[in-house]
Image (tube, rainbow, N blue to C red):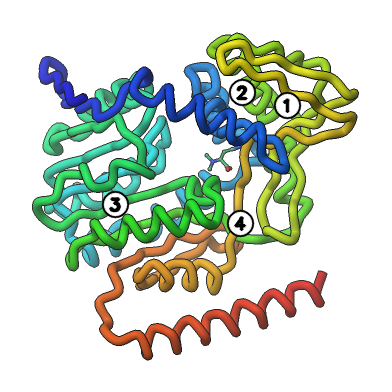
Amino acid sequence: MTRASTEQRARVEVLRNEADGRPALHESTVRSLHAEVKELPAVWLYDERGSRLYDEITRLPEYYLPRREGEILRARAAAIARRTQARTLIELGAGTAKNIRLLLDGLDTAGALERFVPLDVSEQTLRASAETIAAAYPRVSVEAIVGDFERDLGALPANGRRLIAFLGSTIGNLYPEQRNGFLRTLAAVLARDDAFLVGIDLVKDVARLESAYNDSRGVTELFVRNALTAVNRELGATFDQERFVYEARWDPEHEWMDIGLRARKAHAVSIQHLELDVAFEECEPLRVEISSKFRRERFELEAAKARLQVESWWTDAAGDFAIALVLRDTSAGTKVNSKREETACLQAARSAATSTRSR
Ligand code: AVI
């Protein structure tokens, strides 16, 4: 369904509304609760309250990600504008994130920017942030899209040089196979003159990673528990907060933060609208999201597999976070690519071995 409204300063196109996405969400909730590690799809985190709590997380002292990303963007926005000469800036998973304004400032100052296209699943949040941006950048036409970045890349406007930004390390919330699918689709829609700019949180000291997701004020715990509240409200479920403890821990094998809850005692939860009863054993985990952390070699290898090429890689002074400028890989010939993959693969293995030794 496509609907557009033009009375406001920002134009908003709705590719899929909440009701359109409901059957797929119900289906993936059933699938996730039957997985080996029970899980609730992370979408349940981002209702109105969840989006507000996430906004609060981005201001927490322990949650360094947005500040580090901001530091890089402040230093590099002008160079990114020169390099990309983008006429359209697209932001995937736009939400209420503030860092996009640093890019908008850089591109707007450079003078080529005509259009800003934020894309997000949450219509309410998107409308509010699109209006704010439209008021702050009167020379730029704001054309927001309510949609899903995993399914709607093909619907992005396509005339003129585009810069597609995916900030905040949201890419880390995708499982490796989902990331691969996303990057491949992106490579297919990226034109020769387009560029992709992605914010990536890096592997670092475990204590710092764990404290970023176990903040002293307990905001992250409220954010994660809100998924249970949302499922109770929307699906008539009987999750009891008291029966679960919050847990966010580093998984060294997968190099991701494993974020969710753990049942205190064996018990069952019924989910009326899905006609489902879910039995939890004592101590059984219920994952709500993963947050992968990256090494440069691994990210370059993943990009190469999707026929994308990392042109620039910038980090903050402390080396906590990176921003990668990624282009479509136009080099021909599988021989060259397989050589590059092998090199990156060996480098990844070497650096993993070095970091294990130095732990
Ligand atoms: C949105 N995303 C990048 C956040 C992250 O760090 O993975 C979500 C989050 N979950 C808990 N704190 C923040």
Badge 3 marks a residue whose secondary structure is strand
* N-terminal label among 2 and 1: 1
Pick the residue in front: 320 or 247. Answer: 247
Q: Which residue is mark 1?
A: 217
Identify the residue at image location x=46%, y=54%.
199
User: Separation of disc 2 and disc 4 at Cα?
Assistant: 23 Å
The quadrant the N terminus occupies is top left
User: Separation of disc 1 and disc 3 at Cα?
Assistant: 34 Å
Looking at the rendered structure, the kind of residue marked 4 is Lys
The image quadrant of residue 195 is bottom left
Pick the residue in front: 178 or 157. Answer: 178
User: Separation of disc 2 and disc 1 at Cα?
Assistant: 18 Å
Of tags 3 and 2, the one toward the viewer is: 2
Of tags 1 and 3, the one toward the viewer is: 3
In the picture, the disc for residue 293 is 4
User: Separation of disc 1 and disc 4 at Cα?
Assistant: 23 Å
* N-terminal label among 1 and 4: 1
> Crowding at label 4, few (<14), some or many (≥20) Cα neighbours within 10 Å?
many
| Dot 3 and dot 2 residues touching (CB under 8 Å) | no
Say whether mark 3 is within 8 Å of ligand 1: no
User: Separation of disc 3 and disc 2 at Cα?
Assistant: 29 Å
In the picture, the disc for residue 227 is 2
The quadrant the C terminus occupies is bottom right
Of tags 2 and 1, the one toward the viewer is: 2
> Crowding at label 3, few (<14), some or many (≥20) Cα neighbours within 10 Å?
many
Identify the residue at image location x=58%, y=61%.
294
Looking at the rendered structure, the kind of residue marked 1 is Arg
Of tags 1 and 4, the one toward the viewer is: 4
Q: Which residue is mark 3?
A: 164
Tell me which image quadrant ligand 1 sits in.
Answer: top right
Looking at the rendered structure, the kind of residue marked 2 is Ala
Looking at the rendered structure, the kind of residue marked 3 is Ile
